Amino acid sequence: MPSYKAPVRDTLFLLNDVFRISRYANLPGFSDLTPETLQAMLEEAAKFAENVITPLNRVGDVEGCQRHPDASVTTPKGFREAYQQQVAGGWVGMAAPEQYGGQGLPETLSAIVGEFFASASLAFYMYGGLTQGGIAALLAHASDEIKAAYVPDLIAGKATGTMNLTEAHAGSDVGLSYARARKETDGSYRVTGSKVFISAGEHDLAENIIHFVLARIEGAPHGSKGLSLFVVPKFLPAANGGPGKRNGVSCGSIEHKMGIHGNCTCVLNYDDATGWLIGGENGGMQAMFVLMNHSRLFVGGQGVGLAEVAYQNAAAYAQARLQGHSLSGRKFPEKPADPIIVHGDVRLMLMSIRAFTEAARALIVSTTLRNDVAMRKNDPAALRDAENHLALLTPVIKAFFSDQGFLSTLNAQMVYGGHGYIAENGMEQFVRDSRISQIYEGTNGIQALDLVGRKLGLEGGRVVRTYFAEIESFLKEHAEDPGLAPYVTRTREALGHLQEATEWLAKNGAKNPDLVGCGARDYLQLFGLVALAHMWCQIAEAVQRKLGQGTADPYLKAKLVTGQFFVERMLPETQFRLACVKAGGAGAMDMPAELF
């Protein structure tokens, strides 16, 4: 059975030494986050992830969820008890506003804890993790009455949230949705239709489930511009504020799927279900994007979390598994064979995972921290810049991290060889579970189109230019630092590739949009590599600073080795990605459709 140890030290190093969170102690939500408090908080989250959630991962995969004749669903053994512990620990609403019962902590901490829990069991964590996006959507767009009715219960864990966009015939093109809504005289709506692929759509963990449903009000325009967003509870509110009678929503079936078996991904049928409008009529997409973008960052963290747990187990296996001898001579002559950690190919696979996870974790912390700080400074201009920065990086974090997370689980499985293909060792589950992160919350191809087609054009291109200038500023500042020379030199070269690709797409994409369609995924991969290189530069700078203070810590030296591996072995891929972007759609778009 796989094991898991939450990367508390690595996360604290990022918070305290790389991004120096203590600088923000004067801001609301940050004032009590001393190094000691941060450590205690993350250690508690680690204990819960390691001791309570991790043992459920295999159980959930084997047992799955059970639907009963009355359309109710039972989750795997131990899930209900673990969820109650998660609620009691305050982990669901830790970043929610205090006025609704939350702790008012930075979203950064919620993202960090989310990675821990996703590593331990993605299927379990999705029940509470999806709720946070629903809270964000309500706070941004719901009326005060709706907020008061549902936000406290979501924060307290009495209810969980779901996102209902997809229909059998309408996936990424949600404008094709058939679900409809009819307005009642009391201001409520009656929602009818069927939604598929709904994560955590039905379960026995919480008292209620709050569904966020896209539907078209009678007479609304066709397409996405005619969609509205509704909050539709599983149980209608009673007079005392608790759950009352059952609403007209039910689980039609549980999807039989590749992974995350412990999560109830299901078909939900709405039959004149009572719901309430969030935001204005026909403004559903704007409100839903709050939930979606929150969830996309959540998915990026899943990629990091599954890569981390897969790496930990593969590294331990490589230290123990005896096979063959080192090409440079036996390293353990007292043993019948050397452990496979001596082999170059095994080390390359392990280092590629480690170099990704450590920098990816840094980018999540950096991005969410910037947004947290801007929100609390009460500076509209700073908040706009932070939100634009977050918007630019959201498709990169979602798609690049889930791509690399899946590749990382494959590499970790390969370290095990044939034993990685056997279910009892757990590696094949990591592969199956991680695959969904590339698909849901907008497939990674859609994320790439969003980056190139929308995000590069934010404020006339000012946002992406500002991001490039930020990286250039760091490189210029440390150009003469001998300890950072390999990082600065190679990152500057990679940034040049990204800038060239950006200019090429801007020049040629308008002439032939298919060039954008064919080059978008390569562009996103190129962007992700540069973003991680920027993180490795900052990590290396923090390490050099601490080493310069006389700290002789193998942990810090390992950081430099890992970062150098990234810039020397992984970052050169940017040249290949640039070539692919500039290759355009030759071949792919020239093939007649009937010949595929």
Image (cartoon, grey):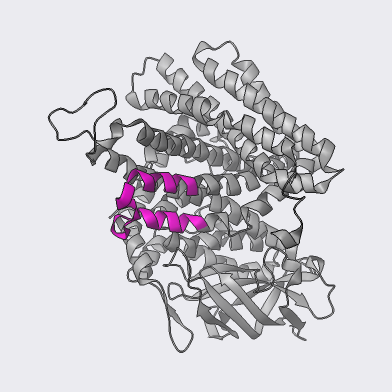
Residue 376 placement (x, y as % from top left): 63, 43
Q: Residue at x 42, y 41 (%)?
A: 38
Say above or below: 254 vs 330. below
In-image side of 94 versus 577 (left or right): left
* Residue 501 in view, yes or no: yes
> Toward the viewer: 340 or 458?
340
Quadrant containing the C terminus is bottom right
Q: Where, quadrant-wise, is the N terminus in this rendering?
A: bottom left
Residue 478 to residue 337: above or below: above
Q: Residue at 42%, 24% (x, y): give it.
A: 561
Q: Does the magenta stretch include residue 422?
A: yes
The foreground one among 222 and 130 is: 222
Extreme residue in the left direction: 334
Q: Foreground: 203 or 565? A: 565
Q: Position of residue 298 (x, y in %)?
A: 55, 53
Q: Residue at x 69, y 76 (%)?
A: 276
Residue 460 in sight in this render: no
Residue 522 located within the stretch drawn in magenta: no
Whether 496 is drawn above or below 273: the answer is above
Q: Considering depth in this image, is 208 or 120 the residue closer to the camera? A: 120
Give left or right: position of 515 versus 400. right
Q: Is residue 170 left or right of residue 512?
A: left
Image point 44% across, 79% down: which residue? 73
Point out residue 278 in the picture as x, y percentages from the top left corner.
Answer: 71, 69
Residue 139 horizontal/vertical position (percent): 65, 60
- Magenta residues, start to end: 406-435
**Which residue is farthest bottom?**
69
Q: Residue furthest right?
A: 511
Quarter holding residue 476: top right
Q: In this view, does 285 lie above or below 221?
A: above
